[in-house]
Image: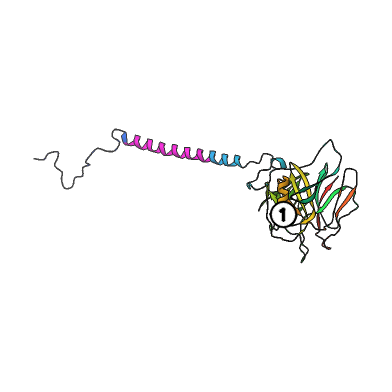
Amino acid sequence: MKTMNDIDDNEIRIIGEPDGDDGRGGKGRFWLYAAVIAGVVVAIIALVVALRGEKDDNVDDGGSTPGKLVTGDISVSDMWLNNNDASKGKGVERRDTVVDGISCAIFTPINVKPELFVGKIDTTDEEIVFAAMAADVRRDNGKIVGAYVLKGEPLAWGLSKKGYCAIINGNMAIGVADNSPLFEQATEEGGYFFRQYPAVGKGQAMENNPENQAFRRALCSLKGDIVIVVSMDKVYMNDFSSMLQHLGVDNAIFLVGGSAQGWTVDMNGAKTRLGSNDIGKSDNINYLLFRR
């Protein structure tokens, strides 16, 4: 007798319950898909928030203004200087002193604008109250040594000297750094930039290789003022740097010293020469000027 459990050779019977008879399989898949979609949405939202935060971190809120400059190099000076004083006239004040046995003169330009000049200078220009040679010029080819920008135009790109001076919108920054974003800013904003041997960086004297004695000059930031310190004695570079540190200088770079051509004009209009030699006939002889 054939029972329900008997299966013929040509008969096919499905054993077990079909999927979804009670709806549990379909519901399981539904929640699985929902969880995956939710995870993707959360990941997208997190990515958008992260990208927006990164963009906000890179926003320059007025960085084109010198006082708000942001730089990634912590060795770069962030102090912009000008010697404006409404209670005084236009000219240069001089103070003489002796530090570490070295006699020197400290020149402070007041209510005048700094700039760079390249070429043969007019020594009779009455608008110029201070002039000193700025960047060095090579003796073999007459080219400017170190990075140099004149009214937004780069003239040289060398990095052999770590000291720098930037002049942008009438303000000056003096510092010591291997790479300075102020070169690019001066190029973009029609400013000035040059490099020289470092003398003082963040209040610490810097060492240099030259061992000869000579009359030294340095462009310095001293208690928030721009000053040029000139030695009245022939001294070694490193001794001069040490003297500047003891004087209280924050940052300083050397200028061309010796008998290099330069002059200063005091508040009464009296002119004093700093040197008379223009060091050759190169077209790239250049000067740091302060002009009325």
| Quadrant of the drawing holding the N terminus | top left
Can I make out residue 121 in this image?
yes
Q: Quadrant of residue 23?
A: top left
Write down the region rendered in magenta.
25-47
Residue marked by disc 1: 239
| 88 over 72 or under it: above or below | above
Magenta run includes residue 34: yes
Residue occupying image coordinates x 35% and y 34%:
27
Q: Position of residue 33 (x, y in %)?
A: 40, 38
Residue 50 as seen in the image, left or right of residue 282: left
Colour mode?
rainbow
Q: Amino acid at mark 1?
A: Asp
Magenta run includes residue 113: no
Residue occupying image coordinates x 89% and y 49%:
271
Q: Position of residue 74 (x, y in %)?
A: 63, 46
Name the foreground residue: 101 vs 78.
Answer: 101
Q: Position of residue 214 (x, y in %)?
A: 78, 58
The single residue placed furthest to the bottom in the displayed view is 140
Task: State the predominant SS element of the stretch in magenta.
Answer: helix
Residue 92 as seen in the image, left or right of residue 179: right
Q: Residues within 10 Å of mark 1 (few under 14, many from 20)?
A: some
Name the foreground residue: 270 vs 167.
Answer: 270
| 7 over 118 or under it: above or below | above
Residue occupying image coordinates x 34% and y 36%:
28
